[in-house]
Amino acid sequence: MRKLFILFGFALLASSVAQAQETRGMEISGQYQYVRIYPGQGAPSSSCQGAGGTFAVNMNSWLGLVGDVGGCRVTGLPSGTSSHEINYLFGPRLTYRTHGRLTPYAQVLFGGERATASATGVPSVSTNAFAMTFGGGADVQLTRHLSFRAIQFEYLYTHFGGAKQNNLRIQSGLVYHFGK
């Protein structure tokens, strides 16, 4: 975790150095998040719905550094039980900027995920694990500072309890651009 904060600090320092070069500013987004969880080892899959957000610093017109935090609640569980997950990811984003309204991108993010489960009369249990996503999406420009993130579609890899999970994450929401 400490290394992730150091990496994020380095990214912010690099972004201030890049201010002298051509930059495209920064962006912040709020998004609906859907995760399809495939726990592996014969366990049934489940859905997890919630919200997420990103903060991105664009180093130039095609490279950005992204911080992504999201949380969701597992649905369809038996009465008296609940579970939720929180993910925190950081990494590079490659963007293909055209002069049109559509801006596609691809990204690879690394970090962690925290899963918490509880049942009536039993203390809650939490665990942390490595997490990684790769995928992409597309933003549609609405105004100079506001875009609609039409879709962000990613493979979400987690590693809980010695088992690998191959999950799917889909997000959509609004993006506010500021800076140059």
Image: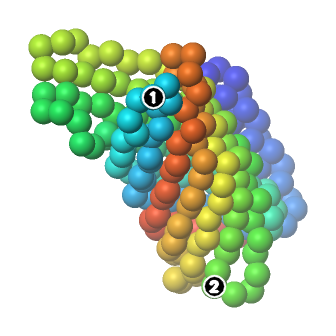
Q: Earlier in the sequence, mark 1 or mark 2?
A: 1
Element at label 2: loop
Left/right of residue 157 with respect to residue 78 in the rendered view = right
Kindly indicate the quadrant of the structure image that contains residue 60.
Answer: bottom right
Colour style of the rendered protein structure: rainbow
Q: Position of residue 147 (x, y in %)?
A: 53, 74
CA separation, marks 1 and 2? Answer: 44 Å
Left/right of residue 30 with respect to residue 111 in the rendered view = left
Residue bearing mark 2: 101
Look at 61% across and 22% down and name the residue there. 1
Q: Position of residue 53 (x, y in %)?
A: 48, 51
Image height of 83 relative to 69, above or below: above
* Residue 57 makes an appearance in the image: no
Please state which of the two labelled residues, at mark 1 or mark 2, is closer to the viewer.
1
Look at 67% across and 28% down and name the residue there. 4
Looking at the rendered structure, the kind of residue marked 2 is: Arg
Say which of 142 and 79 sits in front: 79
Residue bearing mark 1: 42
Q: Which mark is residue 17?
A: none
- The crowding category of the residue bearing disc 2, from other C-alpha atoms within 10 Å (few below 14, some 14 to 19, many at least 20), is few
Image height of 56 relative to 77, above or below: below
Element at label 1: loop
- The crowding category of the residue bearing disc 1, from other C-alpha atoms within 10 Å (few below 14, some 14 to 19, many at least 20), is few
Look at 83% across and 54% down and name the residue there. 18
